[in-house]
Amino acid sequence: MRSLLHALALLVLLSGCAQLETVRLGQDRPEDLQTLMDRHEYARAGQLLDRYPHLDTTERRRLLHDGISRYEDTMLDSAQAKAGNDNLVDAIDVLDEALLKVPGSTRLQFYRDELNSRRTARLRENERQKLMSRARFLLDEQQLYEEQLNLDPPDFTERWKNSRNRHEVSRLHGELLDCGIEKLEQNALDPAGECLSLASEIDNTDEVATALARLESKRSSARTIVAKQEKITQVKKQRTLKKKHINRTQDLLTATRAALDNDDLVLARTTFDRIPPSTRKDDNVVAMQEQLDTAIAARVTGLLDRGDRQYRADKVTAAIATWRKALAIDPDNKEINERLERAGKVLARLEELKSKQK
């Protein structure tokens, strides 16, 4: 009995494996559709719908499309996370696996191409850095060897090692020159300068000197372009700021006019004073300044006269209140400040006399 149970279990297991193997091998049948969808084998699922028209319904096509979209999102998120951790190899592997499921995905392919370009550029830069590190190391070795000559004559092994290093430096000189010229063609001026400067340190040949001259010419052109771009940017900023000031000035002029119409000279003056200096010479601003000055002058003159009458009538407190109204309108008016100072002294003497009488 136990043997029979084992046999049945083995049969079920083999049957399941056979079914999975069928799907894996691509011998897809109509009943495999859901399995393919569950395994994200969307390309094969689509082929199955094409092969069996009775399966190809609008609903199944919608489910296929939605499944592909969600799968792309998931795989892109996974690849971006790995790329964000600077793991470009694993990120590309994720996309390669996904593209086996959805070969026609432009989203997946586009990001894979982008990552591969970044990976290739990084590899090339690493090779350049290794080249420069090796060249610097050998130059230092040569310098130490030459210093050693004056201290202790080298033995055969040291002379052989130095000769080998000199040959390698000569070879690296050519690679550094090629590197510099390649970077010049790519307009990568800083890396080009690093390669060419090191090549020049090894041997400033005519080719190196010519390449360095090209580099300086390109740098000069780049500086000119940058200067022009900065000037254009500055002009745009100035235009934007001027437009902003013009709009703000118009709003403040409208508010000043409203305050004048409401006979609120204090608000009119404080509002007008907020107008940007850059627009103070505009015709509309000058005209408003004249209107405001005229209104303020007339009001201040009236208040000064009223205060003077009150002062002469020994109504010092009332006079001070009147002059303070004038001062609120025209804070820099010396006449008002002088009157207030004089009246303040008078009030102080009066208070002193009152206190003595008590």
Image: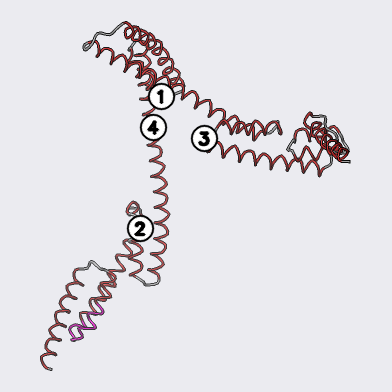
Residue under pointer 2: 275
Asked whether 277 falls inside the magenta stretch, the response is no
Q: Which residues are magenta?
A: 309-322
Residue under pointer 3: 86
Residue under pointer 1: 191
- Local secondary structure at mark 3: loop
**Residue 149 position by quadrant:** top left
Query: Colour scheme used in the picture?
Result: secondary structure
Nearer mark to the viewer, of 4 and 3: 3
- Is mark 1 in CB contact (under 8 Å) with mark 3? no
Amino acid type, mark 2: Ile
How far apart, in angstroms, are the residues tagged by discs 1 and 3? 22 Å
Q: Residue furthest top?
A: 156
How far apart, in angstroms, are the residues tagged by discs 3 and 2? 53 Å
Residue under pointer 4: 226
Name the chief secondary structure element in magenta: helix
- Local secondary structure at mark 2: loop
Amino acid type, mark 3: Asp
Mark with earlier residue (4, 3): 3
Q: Position of residue 266 (x, y in %)?
A: 33, 70
